[in-house]
Image (cartoon, rainbow, N blue to C red):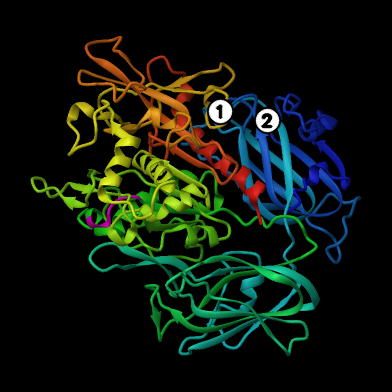
Amino acid sequence: MIILDALHAPELLAVRAADPTGEAARLAVDGREDTVWIGRPGEMQWQWTAAFTKPAHIGLLRARFGSSAVSGIPVDFRWEARPPTGDGTRCDAAGDGGWTALEAAQQHARPTEDFSAMPTRRSWFVDTEACGLRLVVDRTNAGPPVLREVEAIESARDVLKSARASASASFPGLPPAGVIDGTYGGRWAGAPGLSRWTLRVDLPEAQPIDRVRLVLGFDATSTPRAGAGRSYAVAWAPVHYTLEGSEDGRRFVTLATEPLRPDGAVLPLRRRLVVLPEVRRLRVLRIVINGATGADGLPSSSGVPVVREMAAYRVDDGRPVLAAPWVLSVNANPAVESRLTPGGEITNDAYHAKFLQGRFAALIPALRKDDRFARALGDHGEPLDAPPDDRAGEALESIEGDDPLLDAQLLAQSSPPPITVLSGSNDWDYDSATRADAAQPRFWHWDPLRDAHLGGMGQLASAVRDRVAPMVGFCGGAQLLALLEARGAGPTDASHADDQRTIDRILKRTSGHRIRGFAAPVDVERAWPTDSHSQRAVIRFLPDDPLFADLAGAYRRTTTQALPELHSDAVRLDAFLPGGPLQRLQVVATSAFCAPDVVAANGNDAVFANPNGAGWCDTVPEAFRSRDAGWPVIGAQFHAEQRDFSAPGPGDPPESIADPRLFLAATYEQIVDAYVRMGP
């Protein structure tokens, strides 16, 4: 794989600004963060432009903004591209017209938004052919725009953009051309009333192809599981299919068939990159489909297949395939317990997913329109009718943690692998067996280390161990990531007693005691934005760690009271020591929990006398990250994915209310780093 930055290539013709700062614009592409382009103060609008001598296929734009998170960061802006001329292979050096705004790389400020602090690192997946790039800034959070460094990462060029698509039979209004238009919303659907369909794409001439990318199905959905829970499924999708290729349009060879699970069942894979075992010169690609699912994701005689995208890449194009990221919301709770929540499992799944839609929409523009989970719940969590639209499933899907389909195969074979986010917890606590509490049936005991077939999430341990996808966990989700990391190195046939020992090695009450039964009120750490009291948790972080650099800012702040907390359990600090079960993870933030019943869990526990009252204080790991070079694993004991405080904590600067959003943005940028580093 070759990583090329068009702004550091010989084809870069010029970099300039529209205001009198002019040639200083080049300081944003000199590879140094200590040199910057600053727009002239007082302008109504600022423009920064780069021009190329020949077209570049840009897959990802990245920028470092601002003097710090509180100054010089654009909040109302758009990136534009100037397309090639003629046959698409030339750039008109004399012209400066024809600029087109990139839908996936713009932001328009709303009057009610808080811009006191904004992330200094931003990324946009754009997939565009460009003779020039232009940043147009209409407003910043303070002062003129500051542009430290810009990258324009080139991606592999889809050769099917110049092809012609046809089909044996199509649904009215959804022609085959939709699969090669480069958009998710454009799509082909087969005609109803059939059981077999053929979708064909003809290139003008044969090309040496080694990769084919598919996005299948209208949207992800779920179907009821026996007993409790719902299984991941794909609505309006092919059931069985064969991807075929031909050099002459007459004789076809099989390139791939639908992926299967070890038991022979079809793997419901929506996003797939087929890497051909040998390079083939192909003029025609076609998908032969047998059977389709309906709206519920189950095979149906009335089902029709939907193909959203189809792309192919030449073998001599060594640039990565930079498909836009998507988020997989994992309801990390036992389905037997979620079933008893208002609205049942499907509403509880949507509850956790809607927070991610709201938070990630500022980072992944497609989520501004892929909002069906947010529309599915009312202000009080009541289920609402939220019919899917053209963008449904573009950037956010949901799955239950104890769904057997959620495993390393689903995550690793998805292309790109999803940003897998484990939710916080409902009303349950850790135990060596899964059961309702005899005295309080609303509360549950859960052994999450059991395999999904036995009601747990243990099948994910190998996915965490092998770093098959980026994974993020909040509160209980972070604790589960730690448990799965520890289980990943252990036996796959562990007993309930083994699970209890693992839980005791990795987790404890905030007070240092072992987790047995349900937590007493004194063990609960609660600092929640909707509470009337002013209690805050003081979290200390490493200011140089990329996850917290924006929080630290120019004044090198090392604490925050702006991260919401609600938990009674915590990951043990000594588990991260060298030789410990979590040694591949690094703690980058901690807090102190002080209470009369705090004890040292063992001799390595960081317990100290309470400076403000009776009892002791225990050190709680608040954020951790993987040390290795694979897909990142990031856990946070706090709830950065849900809410912000409306006012800063005592002694915190006013902009600290943005700390949860800054942390989430930094987490996303760490994942984008891996997308570039590990892209196919």
Looking at the image, is 27 positioned above or below residue 668? above
Which label is found at residue 651?
none
Left or right of 454 in this view: 108: right
Tell me the quadrant of the picture where the C terminus can be found: bottom right
Check disc 1: other Cα within 10 Å, few if <14, some if 14-19, many if 20+: few
- Residue at x 44% of width, y 58% of height: 407
Of the residues shown, which amino acid type is indicated by label 1?
Answer: Asp
Residue 675 lies, in percent from the top left, at 62, 49
- Main secondary structure along the magenta-highlighted residues: loop
- Residue at x 77% of width, y 45% of height: 5
First in residue order: circle 1 vs circle 2:
2
Of the residues shown, which amino acid type is indicated by label 2?
Answer: Pro
Judged from the image, the secondary structure of the residue bearing numbered disc 2 is loop
Identify the residue at the far left of this view: 439
Task: Report the mark closest to the observer, 1 or 2.
Answer: 1
- Residue at x 49% of width, y 72% of height: 260
In the image, the segment drawn in magenta is 332-336
Say which residue label 1 marks.
545
**Residue 237 painted magenta:** no
Left or right of 525 in this view: 101: right
Of residue 142 and residue 517, the one placed in the foreground of this image is 517
Say which residue label 2 marks.
145
